[in-house]
Image (cartoon, rainbow, N blue to C red):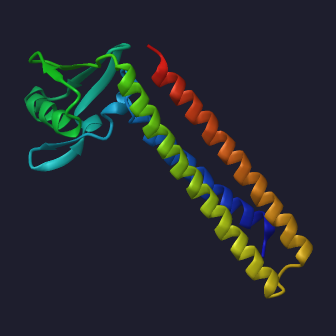
Amino acid sequence: MNESAFINETKSKMSHAISSYKSELVRIRTGRASTGLIDSVNIEYYGSISPIIRLASISVPDGRTITINPYDASSLSAIEKAIQKYDPSLNPSNDGKSINIIIPALTQERRKEIIKQVNKLSESIKQEIRNFRRLANEKIKSSEKSKEISEDQSFKIQKKIQELTDSFIKEIDEITKHKEKEISEV
């Protein structure tokens, strides 16, 4: 068992989980306009499904507005319908050339609900990180039983895996705290 390759493999899996968590957080509404709110909208256009970024340029001119400028004006209504279907709380307005989405301010109650949602997501990602640790430790113990590695090596690798786990859990906590702060800002 190559120790560094094994640790790098586990680190890679944990890093992927963090990246996934960050991309999920981008989609969570904070009361501030962000292109991430509509990045995953798919539009049916001429019989095929296309992501919004292929059909239009998206910008955030101010903290409360998302502006969508389609490359083809005939796709305006399809984009507008797709946004309404994707997130009914977003209310796109079409002026014939572009679509503007005004992001309303969040109520305090809604902010608390969103923070709970973020914390729930945070816990699920932490659990995923812990599962990677558990799987790594099982693999290490299996290698120790089959005499591929010594007991000392096993202990040393498990310690490194635990340190890795702790650092990723800490990173998740920091990311979550930052997102909570972002949501709480009025």
Residue ID at (36%, 21%): 33
Is residue 14 in view?
yes
Residue ID at (66%, 67%): 134
Give the image location of residue 148, x and y in percent: 82, 83
The image quadrant where one finds the N terminus is: bottom right
Give the image location of residue 163, x and y in percent: 78, 52
Give the image location of residue 42, x and y in percent: 23, 43
Residue 33 appears left or right of 172: left
The image quadrant where one finds the C terminus is: top left
Seen as rendered, the residue at the extreme bottom is 146
Q: Please state which of residues 44 and 171 is positioned toward the viewer in this rendering.
A: 171
Quadrant position of residue 88: top left
Tally of marks: 0
Up the image or down, 90 lies above or below 168; here it is above
Is residue 34 in view?
no
Quadrant position of residue 97: top left
Residue 173 appears left or right of 109: right
Residue ID at (72%, 70%): 137
